[in-house]
Amino acid sequence: MQYNVPVLSELVAEGKTPDVVFWVGCAGSFDQRAQRVTVAFTKILNRLQINFAVLGTEEACTGDPARRAGNEFVFQMLAQQNIAALNNYGVKKIVTTCPHCFNTLKNEYPALGGNYEVVHHSTYLQQLINEGKLKVEGGTFKGKKITYHDSCYLGRANDIYEAPRAVIEALDADLVEIKKCKTNGLCCGAGGGQMFKEDEPGKKRINIERTEQLMEVNPDVIAVACPFCNTMITDGVKNENKQDTIKVVDIAELIAQANSY
């Protein structure tokens, strides 16, 4: 399926106003694996004729990595740049596939004058399903054993646990929970910066530990809803030489693939 990505500045020049801005994020823009999630979510938006747009080259990093690393100056510089662009267009609603972007836009931008309704794509997809706008066929995932890894910035930071599970259940798949899930879930390591730095002292990488927990239920698919979790868990599955039998898939990809978008 071909897809179309409207750019906000071009729509505004035509006198049009999108209902929602799709915040792509750095991973979704530049990481090849995360780009596939961006495309999958875009295809869903296109198929449902959602009136959306992206900022395109006007979208900068939210500043989340800079703030977590202690560089408040860079965070505020990036945040104010983004807020100026969003406010200039009168943006009211934002959807994003990245929990890190979601958390920063939703919880940290208001203090700097950026006040928007911010929705993670798991919640957005659940709403579309509940409203009957998104019809989901199980397709190749029907009856498959799927377990879900909770993103820290989605679960622990924002108490969103059920929306991604509701999307998976719509596939008519066998959603299997591991012992350490939801509030007891273990970070994949990316939330603590382990994707970007040398390992902390220890005998085992945290993503290996988390992947072993997820593999305890012998899943066909490990579902994720975060580009960083996707990378960390995929590396963990490869470390176990299970990449041919266990797939790590974002929930948007599950929907797009199931519906043959």
Image: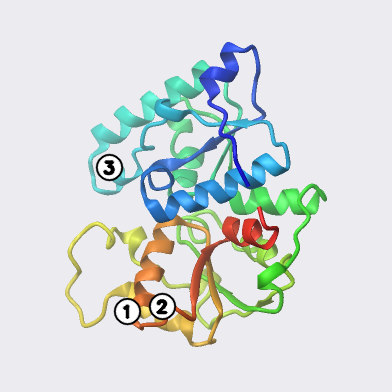
The residue where tag 1 is placed is 239
Q: Which amino acid type is marked by label 2? A: Thr
Secondary structure category for the residue under label 1: helix
Q: CA distance from mark 3 to mark 2?
A: 27 Å
Q: Which amino acid type is marked by label 3? A: Ala
Q: Is residue 135 above or below residue 77?
A: below
The residue where tag 2 is placed is 211
Q: Is residue 188 in view?
A: no
Q: Which amino acid type is marked by label 1? A: Asn
Secondary structure category for the residue under label 3: helix
Pick the residue in front: 32 or 208: 32
> Residue 129, position in %: x, y?
76, 53
Q: Is residue 145 above or below residue 111?
A: below
Q: Is residue 121 in view?
A: yes
Residue sitting at the far right: 132
- Relative to 212, is 90 on the left or the right? right
**Residue occupying the point 40% across, 69% down:** 234
